[in-house]
Amino acid sequence: MKDLLLITPPFTQLNTPYPGTAYLKGFLKTKGISTFQMDLGIEVILKLFTKDVFSELFDYAYENDTIVTENGQRIYSLRHEYLKPLDEVIKFLQGKNNTFARQICTLNFLPQALRFEQLDDLEYAFGLMGMQDKAKHLATLYLEDLSDFIIECIDSNFGFSRYAERLGQSANAFEELYKELHKDPTRIDEITLEILEQRIQETQPNLIGLSVPFPGNLYSAFRCAQYIKAKYPEIKITMGGGFPNTELRSLTDTRVFEFFDFITLDDGELPVELLYKYLSDDSQELKRTFLLENNVVTYKNNCTTPDYKQAQVGTPDYSDLLLDQYISVIEIANPMHSLWSDGRWNKLTMAHGCYWGKCTFCDISLDYIKIYEPVAAKLLVDRMEELIAQTGEYGFHFVDEAAPPALMKALALEIIKRDLVVTWWTNIRFEKNFTKDLCLLLKASGCIAISGGLEVASDRLLKLIDKGVTVQQVAQVTRNLTEANIMVHSYLMYGYPTQTEQETVDSLEMVRQLFEIGILQSGFWHQFALTTHSPIGKNPQDYGVTPHYNTITFANNDVDFSDSTGIDHTKFSYGLKKSLFNFMHGIGFELPLQDWFDFNIPNTTIPPHFIEDCLQNEGLFNTKPTSKIVWLGQKPLIEEQSKTKKGRTFHHLLMTFHTKTEAITISLNKDHGDWLLEQLDVLMPHNEKLPTFSLLKKDFETHFEDFELFWYSKPIVKLRAAGLLAI
């Protein structure tokens, strides 16, 4: 018997568990509250995509005459060819049958329907992918064909990483979802509830918590709650997670509580602990919790205890989850996009909230962004080591809103200090603190990729967004990251309030140049959405926006609006995404921007070498006095040399430093060389207190003159490229 059963309902990711329940289980363990967690989504997928179950789906579709399109008919006609390799394809995507890649890459091995029509367009990109990645991509298309069959013939709400998402998006009223829940369960629902029943029987919980991160999890969460209420009325049910945190803050519809007993908002640790005590009659205090009292939706927040600090919440606990059964998929041949869907990542957070917290399109009024609290680097790496021991996985995705550069620096130094070999990536702001040397340090610690918001590549709009960066800064940071061999993905936005067509075209030209120069490797365009919790949502008149509010009884986040420009920004969507797809694969740079659109656009006003010019204004001779100096290299091989010139003998040290890829040799006069050798020991990352540039200068100048002349000399500049960093 367990106190709690924590569930992530279908569907989130196929390759790795969403971390909400793991964070909560890790905390509850520190309180002695027993929990079992499950990712119901992956369990449904693994049962659904088997020969036996999918054979039943084919029979069901035929018997109910739901196969209507040419694509559906083709898949049904080839049903034996689809069923035959299905179990083996799933094993391959689980990493259990790697030799199967060679068979899959024989292009006539897997049956092909509509999803494979894009193969001709992508064939040129396959040369950049290894055989395993190519096979994963082909296997993904094969599964997407089967997914299309489910959507057409079995359940129109199905989706690999979402389920009935439409019912959760901007659902100001509960009516549509309520009606859907009173229809007969679909076949996907039946599979979901069969697995849920099994887990309830095994764990016999007193309380079930459903974590709902996205709109695509909402329908299934309610369907599960409906089943539990009908069959196990004694079990209490609560909902938390990203969706209620952002969407259900204005909840008034009492019918929601036919399914759930409680809904908690924001950080879940203290609310769930208090809920456990509340149900045990140990306390009447609740934290940020909706419940039904006297048939009225009531918000209880009568606990004065503050939320737990990040140092107190424990290490995420991934036990119970089927970590060896997640499947890696590659939807498109893009290395950055594959990070989200390929491989399993331990998820951690460097800092709660956002250290910037000013972007006008962002929900900065909500606690998950507003309350900024970093975790100490040593504690972070302790947690990394705990997770490695627990999961056997050395990959980490830090899921920060924007990871702070100072903490990233401390984290990287701690990883290097402990001699850990890990792989990690995160989200940042493209701010000036990401110098070339800091990027090299991050790379040395295992950082492989960075994502960040360029949003609208226009200095006017970046200022209006209050992003705190300029296009020039973004260009310099992406260059620094790229030169450190860290892949860069940028979030891009169009349709921001008051944005003109000219600014959209100019923004695209900026993006084109970033890709052409090679300092941006991946990107994604999304259209601006007005949210009620953002500065624009709270003061729309300041941004030339007229909101169209609805009566809110259920979800409240996205708001329909009119922009003062009157521009229909959706018309840019296809051209922006098509051009970006080509730029990501290194083609189409020479084409006029007009070629990407089927309507007339203005000529760009951006000079053709604008981004290139942005990169010319940064020199090497700008080390800050407070920068810490660290040496990441090895001890050199030393050879003493003496030269006599005009009767004077000069003694030199010839130092050869071996890096992973080359040998770098420098020559210094013996006195300077001896001083440097002595300092290299002090500059090793395992030293607790690394000297600053000013302290190093002070020490040098007690023996010699003019440290800057030494620091910026050709030999030391060469050494800086080999791992002598100012961070």
Image (spheres, rainbow, N blue to C red):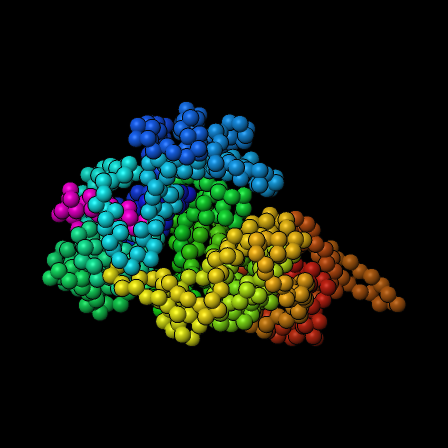
Write the residue at 35% across / 66% down: 548
- The prevailing secondary structure element of the residues shown in magenta is helix
Say if the magenta span includes residue 700. Answer: no
Location of the N terminus (image quadrant): top left
Nearest to the observer: residue 505 or residue 476: 505
Q: Quadrant of residue 78?
A: top left
Write the residue at 34% across / 45% down: 163
In the image: residue 474, left or right of residue 311: right
Write the residue at 32% across / 66% down: 549
Q: Percent from the top left, x then y, of residue 478?
A: 58, 60
Q: Is residue 486 visible?
A: no
Q: Percent from the top left, x then y, of residue 289?
A: 22, 61
Q: Quadrant of residue 508?
A: bottom right
In the image: residue 338, left or right of residue 639: left
Say if the magenta span includes residue 220. Answer: yes
Q: Which residues are magenta?
A: 217-236
Q: Percent from the top left, x then y, of residue 359?
A: 44, 68
Residue 504 drawn above or below residue 132: below
Write the residue at 78% across / 58% down: 641
Q: Is residue 558 visible?
A: yes
In the image: residue 50, left or right of residue 298: right
Nearest to the observer: residue 502 or residue 16: 502
Q: Percent from the top left, x then y, of residue 690?
A: 54, 66
Location of the C terminus (image quadrant): bottom right
Q: Looking at the image, which residue sits at the far right?
A: 646
